[in-house]
Amino acid sequence: MGVLRENVFYLLAASLLLAFGMYAGASIPQSGVPLSDSPLLKEIEKYVQFYKPYDPITILFLLAKNSLTAAVAFFLGPLLLIVPAVILFLNGFIVGMIGAALSDQFSLVYALKVLAPHGIFEIPALVFASAGGFRLGVAALRKLSSKMRHREYSLSAEFKGTWRLLVISVILLLIAAVMETYVTPFIIGYSP
């Protein structure tokens, strides 16, 4: 695919940052405190009230919440590349920490049942959006450098090369929202 080939460096950088965040999150010592008592989960609980398995409205909520994160990573990439880097690291950290806690308290299989069905779509979606943000950030730095040298550099050409990453991201987030609403609850045996 052309979009992958022309953005391979940015996709690799985004993947490595996310993986580093996952590793960091999984590496924090498990204190034996149940996941339900975790301070991080207390913050996440604000959003859990909107999550209702098997409810189509949940798909819209998850899609909106995750698309907002992807859009922030994409459009704020020109701010010295910091925003997509922080979003990738923090999301990876949360996934790693929750995965490690679920593995510790239940089992690795259970952790995979909870995280993998939607994660196989949601994680690449975040990588695609952030890679686009990185590319736009590099383009903004090139534009600034060109301006200082009194040369022309087109940001619009770079945007045209990255918008497909955002589109792919949103499509993957829609699939992830459906999976998280219908498939994950089914796999873990949740019944309303």
Image (cartoon, helix red, strand yellow):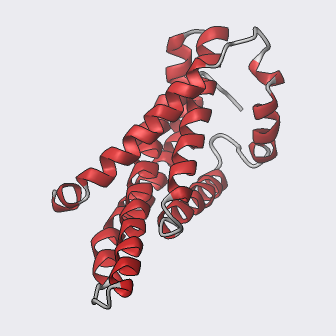
Q: Residue at x 79, y 25 (%)?
A: 38
Query: In the displayed structure, would residue 151 be above or below residue 192?
Result: below
Residue 48 appears in the figure: yes
Horizontal arrangement in the rendering, residue 148 relative to residue 33 (left or right): left
Q: Quadrant of the N terminus?
A: bottom left
Q: Nearer the viewer, residue 175 or 56?
A: 175
Quarter of the figure with residue 151: bottom left
Q: Residue at x 69, y 12 (%)?
A: 30
Residue 171 appears in the figure: no
Q: Could you tell me residue 44's position as x and y percent?
A: 75, 40
Q: Quadrant of the C terminus?
A: top right
Q: Could you tell me residue 102's position as x and y percent?
A: 63, 17
Q: Nearer the viewer, residue 37 or 113?
A: 37
Q: Nearer the viewer, residue 145 or 54?
A: 145
Horizontal arrangement in the rendering, residue 107 relative to residue 8 (left or right): right
Q: Could you tell me residue 121's position as x and y percent?
A: 42, 43
Q: Nearer the viewer, residue 36 or 152?
A: 152
Query: In the displayed structure, would residue 30 be above or below residue 152?
Result: above
Q: Could you tell me residue 90's position as x and y percent?
A: 60, 42
Q: Residue furthest front?
A: 149
Q: Residue at x 35, y 62 (%)?
A: 165
Horizontal arrangement in the rendering, residue 46 relative to residue 7 (left or right): right
